Image (cartoon, helix red, strand yellow):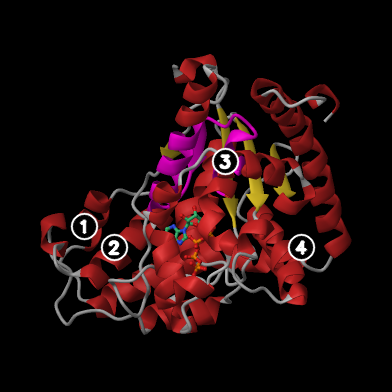
Amino acid sequence: MTEAAFTPRVFSGIQPSGNLHLGNYLGALKRFAEAQNKGIQTLYCMVDLHAITVWQDPADLARATRELAAGFIASGLDPARSILFNQSQVAEHTQMAWVFNCVARMGWMQRMTQFKDKAGKNAQNASLGLFAYPALMAADILTYHATHVPVGEDQKQHLELTRDIAIKFNHDYGVEFFPIPEPVIEGAATRVMSLRDGSSKMSKSDPSDMSRINLTDDADTIAKKIRKAKTDPEPLPSEVAGLEGRPEARNLVNIYAALADMTVDQVMAEAGGKPFSEFKPMLADLAVDRIAPISTEMARLMQDLSEIDRILADGAARARAIAAPILRQTYEIMGMVGAREV
Ligand code: AQP
């Protein structure tokens, strides 16, 4: 099957698990807005059903979902041009996820490194949902026949599993029904690292708030976190190759490049040879310039929660209009009686 058979459509999601951060912005949100601005149909989802694969306090989940919606809009997503919605408001995701639970193989799931990382040593006590997470993610994407999925590097393996599910379904039923979606992992910051440790990913769940720049941080906090970011004692090298083996330096250069819409080579041409005492203030100014307005706009949007709820309800209705016929056709292909009435 060729991709060309399907109209290009972009889908991606973020978990409303709090602490939306610079990695989510550069790896996902900023690129979501770029896809929207290319005029392709774009659907973006607050994946609350994914978030509950680990414990979420109900009040915190509700707040984080609305805050994430505000983060989407403040990052440039226009609810009139993109479909913005909350996953649990479109039941087709979970219906399709069950189908894919029956397509995916145990062995495929057991290979998922994110499950191993998140379940840790206590895998027997992890939720079944955490194990089945990638099948729900495949449902999110394929229920819209999405062809392109902008994500950070950490989601690559899950995307490969989505492709495997689409291929197996099409093969088992002898159809060319699901597209084989392409991961879109591009730019200088596909894997933003912790500001405290250049070998671990910047993440919502890192206990140290200094490890990440939150999209809700004010200008002073952003500048302070960059000033205190871990580095080595050497100045920046004069060429990209010199960043090899210097993960913290590499991370700050990548962040600069992504925020400034420059290549890493261009950053090195501008900042190569500078000590961190000069480079960090340059980066702090740039980060404040790009992130502080998002934080201000999020706070403004959070003043009117009923407007956020209205946007999500409208998005859910538009999402369902695409998802429902695709689920119905899936059921028909599988021989489910009454599929037309679903
Ligand atoms: N550090 C990162 N660099 C680049 N992209 C990142 N993403 C996450 N972290 C980075 C991308 O953001 C999108 C949404 O991620 P998510 O919230 O669905 O899940 P996650 O990847 O599990 O996020 P966290 O921060 O790492 O959460 P925890 O701490 O709970 O594990 C995805 O496109 C992801 O690639």
Q: Earlier in the sequence, mark 4 or mark 1?
A: 1
**Looking at the image, is 278 positioned above or below residue 133?**
below
Distance from the alpha carbon under mark 2 to that under mark 3: 44 Å
Image quadrant where one finds the C terminus: top right
Closest to the camera, between mark 3 and mark 1, is: 3
Determine the secondary structure under disc 2: helix
Q: Judge whether residue 311 can be spotted in this image.
A: yes
Q: How far across and how far down the image is residue 166, in percent?
A: 50, 31
Q: Which residue position holds label 2?
A: 253
| Ligand 1 under 8 Å from disc 1 Cβ | no
Q: Which residue position holds label 4?
A: 301
Distance from the alpha carbon under mark 3 to that under mark 1: 50 Å
| Mark 2 and mark 1 residues within 8 Å of each other at the beta carbon | yes
Magenta residues span 137-166
Q: Which mark is on residue 297?
A: none
Q: Which residue position holds label 3?
A: 102
Q: How far across and how far down the image is residue 336, in percent?
A: 73, 27
Q: Which residue position holds label 1?
A: 268
User: Residue sitting at 54 percent across and 62 percent down?
Assistant: 130
Q: Main secondary structure of the magenta part?
A: helix
